[in-house]
Image (cartoon, helix red, strand yellow):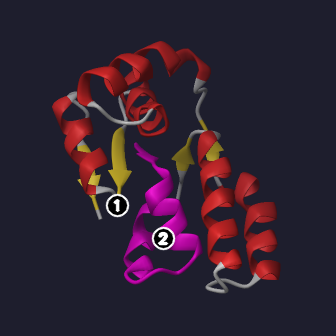
């Protein structure tokens, strides 16, 4: 099983270059609830820059919670803190790594630095 981080989710839903290749990973998508907030924030930035249609953004955000299964993230916060401190990354990124670690999932990310940190932390990682 794979845990999908926000970089993948944003790339896919905002149809950034290469988004089509991510379809194969999204048949039974799993993430953490933080991804909803990060997707919303990324789409808001794109709307403000006139790079994405506001109505489409709202439709994506309304659909998103029913598209993904979310694993419990609150039980991973202390591990995320340790990862963030040890590897000098954000607590947000470390939350995905810690959740993947806790449940024994691979991590799917399009963020090169996050992939590097996840591997150092011992999480099998697929980088898109």
Identify residue for label 2.
Answer: 11
Q: Residue at x 40, y 32 (%)?
A: 94
Residue reaching furthest front? 49
Sequence-earlier tag: 2 or 1: 2
Magenta range = 1-25
Q: Is residue 26 visible?
A: no
Say few, some or many: other residues with alpha carbon within 10 Å of mark 1 (under 14 / 14 to 19 / 20 or more): some
Please check the rendered image and state whether residue 10 is part of the magenta-colored stretch, yes or no.
yes
Q: Residue at x 78, y 79 (%)?
A: 54
71 w.r.t. 20: above or below: above
Q: How many marks?
A: 2
Please check the rendered image and state whether residue 26 is part of the magenta-colored stretch, yes or no.
no
- Residue 78, position as x, y percentages in the image: 47, 13
Tell me the SS state at disc 1: loop
Where's the N terminus, which quadrant?
top left
**Where residue 110 is drawn, which disc sits there?**
1
78 w.r.t. 44: above or below: above
């Amino acid at each position: 099983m794979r845990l999908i981080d926000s970089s993948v989710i944003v790339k896919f839903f905002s149809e950034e270059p290469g988004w089509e290749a991510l379809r194969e990973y999204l048949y039974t998508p799993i993430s953490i609830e933080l991804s909803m907030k990060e997707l919303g924030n990324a789409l808001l930035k794109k709307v403000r820059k006139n790079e994405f249609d506001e109505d489409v953004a709202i439709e994506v955000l309304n659909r998103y919670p029913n598209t993904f299964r979310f694993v419990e993230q609150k039980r991973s916060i202390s591990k995320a803190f340790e990862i963030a401190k040890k590897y000098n990354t954000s607590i947000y990124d470390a939350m995905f790594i810690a959740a993947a670690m806790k449940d024994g999932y691979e991590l799917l990310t399009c963020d090169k630095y996050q992939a590097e940190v996840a591997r150092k932390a011992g999480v099998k990682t697929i980088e898109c």
